[in-house]
Image (cartoon, grey):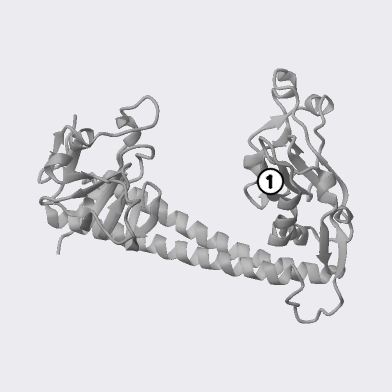
């Protein structure tokens, strides 16, 4: 094996010569979380595997710490500074020896924790198993520099997350105002009218799933077949599944024409998409061809509005899986302007907000990808930072 000059072979692979390999147990101590139910409410956070659960007036540890899942969720280390309490399914770390805590945190994010699972049922980790995990450690000054570089990009990601959340709240407020007529756009004054959902479409029907045991209905299929996962985005421009024309002819599936509304009404209720390609849908997913009184984009946002969702919630059938049939949707009252120019103006504002959010999410995803690459290079010593 060709080892570059200035590097050495170790149990963890090739690392810089001035780095060392140590087990976690030589770098820190591990404490067990415990029950907090008898503690009065306060301002000290109680952490579970998903983050803060509640606040109490006592703490287990004060300082920098890394929390590691002991049972259940064992693959999401958490970093925290300050006073903290942790539940009994979470370890906390303390007594750090000659290491930068934030650097150790980033190292722990790279570990395949599930491969260390010692249980056949609920995933579990023993503290002894954690103590034996080997870490590649540069000099402390370099650890600090690496942690700062990764912390900077984490800060950019967090700032974008905050901005995205704010934009979503603004959009939610705009939908509530614009889709109810509470706020009118300049140039529009005609009164809004009340219709029923059934007035909004020329044709609507659930799809169907061809017999899954008959491969003639699926093999080499060329009809995009919409499933729930395909309805997570505004526009459906491709599908992961396909059926054949024979499958359509032998089931209740039908071809939903381009620029229709796709609405999930079984099990997962309320996903809304616009299909930009002809599709068929499985049962529990409606294809809705809009009528001439409503603009397609306006209808998309109308079906996502809080008012419409409340009406749907009050009409759905409860069972093993919640469902709402088309007949129940048909009776939902709809308040809208008949002037389609106003519909288009409203939809354009909301669409522009969506575009702004999408752009921010794309920027955040680029930073996440950059961070992943930085971690791969910096935490293995493939790229060295200049230490001031």
Q: Residues within 10 Å of mark 1 (few under 14, many from 20)?
A: many
Residue in view at x 85 percent, y 50 percent = 330
Q: Nearer the viewer, residue 242 or 7?
A: 242
The residue identified by callout 1 is 269
Q: Is residue 154 left or right of residue 317?
A: left
Q: Quadrant of the C terminus?
A: bottom left
* Residue 362: percent from left, percent from top: 51, 57
Q: Is residue 184 above or below residue 80?
A: below
Q: Residue furthest front?
A: 38
Residue 6 seen = no
* Residue 307: percent from left, percent from top: 72, 61
Q: Quadrant of the N terminus?
A: top left
Q: Is residue 215 above or below residue 124?
A: above
Q: Which of the 4 image quadrants contains residue 178?
A: bottom right
Residue in view at x 37 percent, y 24 percent = 120
Q: Is residue 7 above or below residue 171?
A: above
* Residue 183: percent from left, percent from top: 73, 77
Q: Is residue 287 above or below residue 311?
A: above
Count of numbered circles on the image: 1
Q: Which of the 4 image quadrants contains residue 146?
A: bottom left
Residue in view at x 16 percent, y 55 percent = 142
Q: Secondary structure at mark 1?
A: strand
Q: Is residue 205 left or right of residue 105?
A: right
Q: Is residue 352 left or right of residue 329?
A: left
Residue 62 seen = yes
* Residue 352: percent from left, percent from top: 64, 67
């Amino acid at each position: 094996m060709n080892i570059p000059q200035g590097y050495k072979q170790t149990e963890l692979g090739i690392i810089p010569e001035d780095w060392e390999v140590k087990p976690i147990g030589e770098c820190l101590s591990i404490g067990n979380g415990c029950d907090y139910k008898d503690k009065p409410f306060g301002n000290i956070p109680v952490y579970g595997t998903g983050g803060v659960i509640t606040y109490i007036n006592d703490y287990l540890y004060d300082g920098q710490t890394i929390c590691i899942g002991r049972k259940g969720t064992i693959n999401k280390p958490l970093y925290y500074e300050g006073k903290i309490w942790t539940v009994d399914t979470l370890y906390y770390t303390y007594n750090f020896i000659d290491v930068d805590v934030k650097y150790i945190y980033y190292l722990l994010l790279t570990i395949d924790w599930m491969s260390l699972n010692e249980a056949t049922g609920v995933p579990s980790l023993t503290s002894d198993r954690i103590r034996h995990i080997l870490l590649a450690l540069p000099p402390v000054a370099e650890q600090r520099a690496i942690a700062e570089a990764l912390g900077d990009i984490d800060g950019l990601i967090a700032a974008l997350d905050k901005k995205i959340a704010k934009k979503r709240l603004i959009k939610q407020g705009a939908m509530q105002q614009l889709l109810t007529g509470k706020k009118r756009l300049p140039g529009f004054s005609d009164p809004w009218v009340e219709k029923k959902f059934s007035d909004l479409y020329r044709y609507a029907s659930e799809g169907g799933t061809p017999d899954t045991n008959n491969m003639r209905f699926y093999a080499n299929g060329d009809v995009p077949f919409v499933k729930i996962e395909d309805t997570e985005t505004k526009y459906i421009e491709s599908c992961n599944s396909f059926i054949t024309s024979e499958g359509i002819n032998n089931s209740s599936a039908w071809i939903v024409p381009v620029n229709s509304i796709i609405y999930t009404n079984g099990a997962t209720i309320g996903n809304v998409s616009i299909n930009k390609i002809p599709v068929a849908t499985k049962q529990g997913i409606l294809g809705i061809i809009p009528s001439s009184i409503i603009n397609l984009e306006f209808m998309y946002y109308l079906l996502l509005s809080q008012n419409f969702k409340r009406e749907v919630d009050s009409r759905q059938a409860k069972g093993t899986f919640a469902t709402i049939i088309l007949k129940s949707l048909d009776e939902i009252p709809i308040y809208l302007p008949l002037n389609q120019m106003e519909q288009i103006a409203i939809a354009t504002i909301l669409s522009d907000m969506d575009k702004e959010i999408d752009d921010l999410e794309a920027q955040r995803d680029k930073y996440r990808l950059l961070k992943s690459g930085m971690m791969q290079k910096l935490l293995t010593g493939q790229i060295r930072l200049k230490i001031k």
